[in-house]
Image (tube, helix red, strand yellow):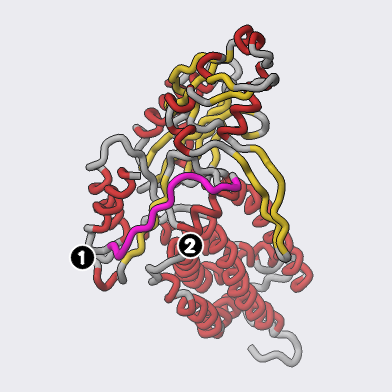
Amino acid sequence: MELDIAVGRALRNLPEVDHVVSRVGSDELGLDPMGLNETDMFLKLKPKSEWREPDKGWLIEQIRRKLIEFPGIEYGFTQPIEMRVSEMLTGSRGDLAIKVFGPDLGVLGDLATRVAATVEKVPGARDVLTQTTEGVDYLKLDINAAAAGRYGLSVADVQDELRAQVEGVAAGHVIEPDRRTPILVRGGDEVRMSAERFARIQISLPEGGEVPLSALARIRPGSGPVKIGREGGARFALVQANVDGRDLVGFVDEAKRAVASRIALPAGYSLQWGGQFENQQRAAARLGLVVPVALGLIFVVLFMTFGSARQALLILCNVPFALVGGVLALWMSGQYLSVPASVGFIALLGVAVLNGLVLVTQFNQLHAQGLPMQRVVREGAWRRVRPVMMTASITALGLVPLLLASGPGSEIQRPLAIVVVGGLVSATALTLLLMPLLYYRFGQPDTLRAHDGIAPVEGATA
């Protein structure tokens, strides 16, 4: 508690911090995955207009410099809602969570420490920490069964008496008109917090009278586990890490190779990689199914519209036109292929296909009038410049607020907007320049594609 207060005062000295609220340990219901030796420290920040440098990354570095002054603590950065969602989904708070499974707590602690040291050396790793599995002071009680038997007690009788002193025993309920309050009887705090007083606890004898606990058992100090984490019926130790300056998937791949080459797991022990990385992998697997299905449905609709697989595939050529701009926009902005960016690519495909549909429809109308193919593609592209530009510009301008966002939620909004805006630029330009050429070469079957001197059909004007 004293350390938490000292850390809070140090952070409160930062001009950007309004006030600090700390919450130590876990809740009474046991629903919080935090250990008893962990603290949630919430920082309420002043408006960005009052910051010395209006940049969140810069402020985090200032906080890190303050925390370095307190040796022995391990820390990580998150946000309240993000923290709760991560805890509910994966049971951890970092971008990457490595769970080391095995039966022995000592071996688990050693492996987790080595894994954390290895991951910390991977470029991009930040705030790497592992939960301590052992080191809490305990009072170990060895009950002498022979001594207890001489007083007419069994080991179970002594254990029940001690459990009542430490944990308490239910003694009934107080019934009121609108509530039922349970009554719990247990020893005072001074008994549980003092080894000397605990040794002087009086144990009731069956025939009457009392005997001190020290006459029945040997009490000695020792150390034990901080918390025993279990998942799927197996014990595990947790290593957490955040990723900064690179993509999460590439970081995890490199970390896996580093851990596999430097750490040999004993028999019966295994690693599981999760956290936000697990969510990303799950989302990528879904997108890997959704995108081909969406493209397949688009092809079916286009085929039903034109009655030609050739033209349906021609319109789908707009898809790579859009992907080029989206990928370049991500690269130029320093962003990575995340789930929001993937969603942006899906939205981009719809606009790109729509522009291709508009252009090919105009080409078909002009071709049906009997115009030469060169004139079809030239006039058709020129007539559809305005509709294609309007479709792309309206979508792009509508995403400008998301593109310039810097407040809460911008980490999700900006990648999506960057992909769509960048993809629309390339898709619009390449659609107007390359689609006419592709239509001229592949738009109509050879038997129907006319050369420049084709005779117009009856009633058509050349």
Q: Residue at x 65, y 47 (%)?
A: 183
The answer to the question of whether label 2 and label 1 lie on touching residues, with beta carbons closer than 8 A, is no
Q: Quadrant of the C terminus?
A: bottom right
Q: Amino acid at mark 1?
A: Arg
Pick whichever, 39 or 411, lies toward us.
Answer: 39
Say which mark, if any, is on residue 52: 1
Residue 19, magenta (yes or no): yes
Relative to residue 18, is residue 281 depicted above or below? above
In what element is the residue under mark 1?
loop
Q: Amino acid at mark 2?
A: Ile
Which range of residues does the magenta coloring cover? 17-29
Across and down, in percent, residue 147 comes to 60, 9
Q: Say above or below: 265 vs 225.
A: above
Q: Does residue 238 appear in the picture of this structure?
A: yes
- In depth, the one of 373 and 76 nearer the eye is 76
How far is the residue under mark 2 from the one under mark 1?
Answer: 26 Å
Q: Is residue 272 left or right of residue 113?
A: right
